[in-house]
Image: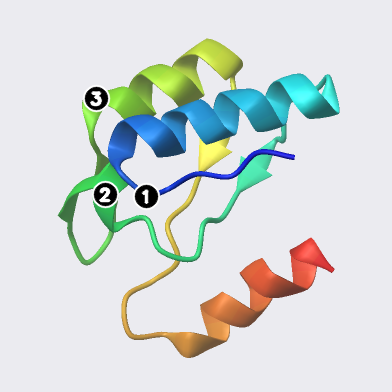
Amino acid sequence: MYYFANVKKEICIEAYIKLFNFLESVLLLTVPGNLKIGVTKHLKSEVILNQSYEDLINYYHTVIIAARVKHPEDKGVVENTIK
């Protein structure tokens, strides 16, 4: 098990890489509960991720969808997948 002292961008990217290595596969879709550090701009119809996250999803051929701001019902979807 890995423990991370904080949630800086570089550490989150490292956590995704360790997760994919642990699972020996890649998740097709990831919905993080709080992706503030990964979002460059949040428009009404789209979320623009920063370059580090873009590189991650392109390298692993996966999708990261940020939970919507001020929509607590999205948080339940994220937490239910952990159970």
C-alpha span from label 3 to label 1:
17 Å
Would you name the residue on which mark 2 appears? 37
Asked which secondary structure carries label 1, the reply is loop
Residues at marks 1 and 2 touching, judged by CB atoms closer than 8 Å: yes
Is residue 79 at all visible to an observer of this figure?
yes
Instruction: Residue 83: give its label.
Output: none
Residue 68 pos. (x, y %): 38, 71
* Amino acid under disc 3: Gln
Q: Amino acid at mark 1?
A: Val
The nearer-to-camera label among 3 and 1 is: 1
In the rendered structure, find residue 51 and report the number of the disc placed on it.
3
> Which amino acid does the dot numbered 2 rest on?
Ile
Q: Are marks 2 and 3 in contact (CB under 8 Å)?
A: no
The disc, 2 or 3, on the residue closer to the chain's N-terminal end is 2
Task: Decide if residue 40 is on the left or right side of residue 63.
Answer: left
Q: Would you call the spot at circle 3 few (<14 residues within 10 Å), some (14-19), or many (20 or more)?
A: few
Residue 19 falls in image quadrant: top right
Viewed as shown, does residue 32 lie left or right of 37? right
Measure how far apart labels 2 and 3 are at the Cα level. 11 Å
Label 3 sits on a secondary structure element that is helix
